[in-house]
């Protein structure tokens, strides 16, 4: 927990996975979403892909196709394998306006990163 709290993106991602997949009664979906968001924002493409799935399915946070598409796009741009299928699945549920919004969200995020 300490490395995740100190800002280590990989530790944040691993903590998110542990909270997401826990079967011993310690599963905490909102906390998993929060840690996954931090790791995704740090550029961990597997966190970006997982966050896209979480948004798409409404796991630990409200279902949001625009955010799902934006994070899936970022994961694909970061080199995430198999993210194309996820992007297509999300796109099939979206309106053209939502697609444009998600593309702008992804562009904005990418341009704000060093």
Image (spheres, rainbow, N blue to C red):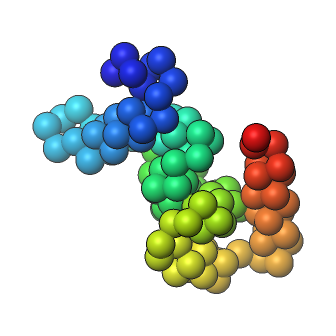
Which residue corresponds to the image point at 17% horizontal and 44% vertical from the top-left?
A: 23
Q: Could you say which is closer to the camera, residue 33 or residue 78?
A: 78
Which residue corresponds to the image point at 52% horizontal and 72% vertical from the top-left?
A: 83
Which residue corresponds to the image point at 34% horizontal and 40% vertical from the top-left?
A: 14
Residue 49 against residue 83 in the figure, above or below: above
Work out whether residue 94 can be spotted.
yes
| Residue 101 located left or right of residue 86 | right
Q: In the rendering, at what x and y percent does residue 90 appear? A: 60, 74
Work out whether residue 105 can be spotted.
no
| Residue 22 located left or right of residue 67 | left
Query: Outermost residue toward the front?
Result: 114
Q: Quadrant of the C terminus?
A: top right
Which image quadrant is residue 107 in? bottom right
Q: In the rendering, at what x and y percent does residue 52 appear? A: 55, 59
Q: In the rendering, at what x and y percent does residue 37 appear? A: 55, 41
| Residue 70 located left or right of residue 45 | right
Residue 68 against residue 91 in the figure, above or below: above
Which residue corresponds to the image point at 28% horizontal and 40% vertical from the top-left?
A: 18
Q: In the rendering, at what x and y percent does residue 109 appear? A: 77, 49
Q: Quadrant of the N terminus?
A: top left
């Amino acid at each position: 927990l300490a490395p995740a709290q100190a800002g280590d993106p990989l530790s944040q991602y691993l903590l998110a996975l542990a909270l997401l997949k826990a079967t011993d009664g310690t599963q905490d979906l909102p906390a998993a979403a929060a840690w996954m968001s931090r790791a995704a924002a740090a550029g961990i493409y597997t966190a970006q892909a997982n966050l896209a799935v979480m948004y798409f399915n409404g796991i630990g946070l409200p279902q949001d196709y625009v955010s799902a598409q934006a994070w899936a796009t970022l994961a694909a741009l970061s080199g995430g394998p198999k993210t194309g299928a996820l992007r297509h699945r999300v796109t099939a549920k979206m309106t053209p306006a939502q697609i444009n919004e998600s593309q702008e969200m992804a562009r904005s995020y990418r341009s704000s990163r060093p």
